[in-house]
Image (cartoon, rainbow, N blue to C red):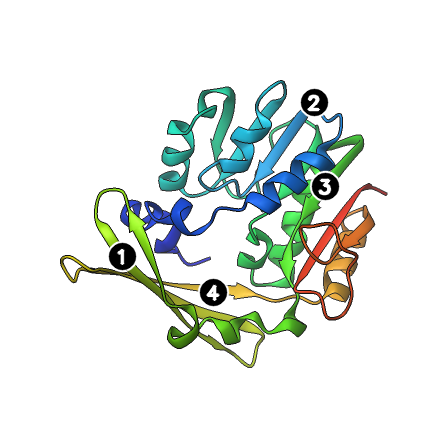
């Protein structure tokens, strides 16, 4: 995969937690964790979820972006998590976990079927008998990328050091099903602009289900949102929750 500056440039990573709170997702993940005593967070990013799991549990957070992990290590509870800089497609820790998660739509950064199967294989390789996995992907039928245009996505955020910053997206969908979008941040006080181009896939529920089965996993539940609603063809999210087959 091409290096994505959105996750690897410290200046851009500095905005990540300002625009990605994930509070509803966090609460749902903690509820679904149940009695899990060990958690593997693949694509952990800046570590918000991994750190929240760390009280009373053994937690490992894996991400390929060192700039994201630098933020993760500094956050509250960061010292309680084992952070590993590695690719979710290939990492093998030689350990198994009660819960393996891949949230924040990380599954979508894997653009090919081969890469998606590799990530699902990583989940299966690290899942303990009786354990569970959980991940999310946007439902392509909802065509979320239509909202990622300047007129609909522009927002003002307050940066603790730089003051007000205007942010927006500019997206286009390709014939191959890959959506390319550019993230923009413009500092109001200085006019400085930061930008990065990203690509994400939008696999269907059927394709995800086939990959889960091929990896030796089984989805026990399919959610359509982080509030716990059941999946329907009109859902905005595809969220499988399950275990080893």
171 or 198, which is in the foreground?
A: 171
Q: Nearer the viewer, mark 1 or mark 4?
A: 1
- Tag 1 secondary structure: strand
Secondary structure of residue under mark 3: strand
Q: How far apart, in angstroms, are the residues tagged by discs 3 and 1?
A: 37 Å
Secondary element under disc 2, as helix, strand or loop, is loop
Q: Is residue 70 above or below residue 89?
A: above
Q: Which residue is mark 1?
A: 165
Mark linked to residue 133:
3
Q: Earlier in the sequence, mark 3 or mark 1?
A: 3
Q: At x 53% / y 43%, what residue is drawn? A: 43
Marked residue nearer the N-terminal end (1 or 2) = 2
Q: Which mark is residue 109?
A: none
Left or right of 235? Residue 105 is: left
Give the CA distance from mark 3 to mark 2.
14 Å
Q: Which residue bears the numbered disc 4?
A: 199
Residue at image x 35%, y 47%?
Answer: 13
* Circle 4 SS class: strand
Q: Quadrant of residue 192?
A: bottom left
Whether pointer 1 and pointer 2 mark residues with C-beta atoms closer than 8 Å, the reply is no
> Are the residues at dot 2 and dot 4 in contact (C-beta closer than 8 Å)?
no
Q: Position of residue 75 (x, y in %)?
A: 41, 29
């Amino acid at each position: 995969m091409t290096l994505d500056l959105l996750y690897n440039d410290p200046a851009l990573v500095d905005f990540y937690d300002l625009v990605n709170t994930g509070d509803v997702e966090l609460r749902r993940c903690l509820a679904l964790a149940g009695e899990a005593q060990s958690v593997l967070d693949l694509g952990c990013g800046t570590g918000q979820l991994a750190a929240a799991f760390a009280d009373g549990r053994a937690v490992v957070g894996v991400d390929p972006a060192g700039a994201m992990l630098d933020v993760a290590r500094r956050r509250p509870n960061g010292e309680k998590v084992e952070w590993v800089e590695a690719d979710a497609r290939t990492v093998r820790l030689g350990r198994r976990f009660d819960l393996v998660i891949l949230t924040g739509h990380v599954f979508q950064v894997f653009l090919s079927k081969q890469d998606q199967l590799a990530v699902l294989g990583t989940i299966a390789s690290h899942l303990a008998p009786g354990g569970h996995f959980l991940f999310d992907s946007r439902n392509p039928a909802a065509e979320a990328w239509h909202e990622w245009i300047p007129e609909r996505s522009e927002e003002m955020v307050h940066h603790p050091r730089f003051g007000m910053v205007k942010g927006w997206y500019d997206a286009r969908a390709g014939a191959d099903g890959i959506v390319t979008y550019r993230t923009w941040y413009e500092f109001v006080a200085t006019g400085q602009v930061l930008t990065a181009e990203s690509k994400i896939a939008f696999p269907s529920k059927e394709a995800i289900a086939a990959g889960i089965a091929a990896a030796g996993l089984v989805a026990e539940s399919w959610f359509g949102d982080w509030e716990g609603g059941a999946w329907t063809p009109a859902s905005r999210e595809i969220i499988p929750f399950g275990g080893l087959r």
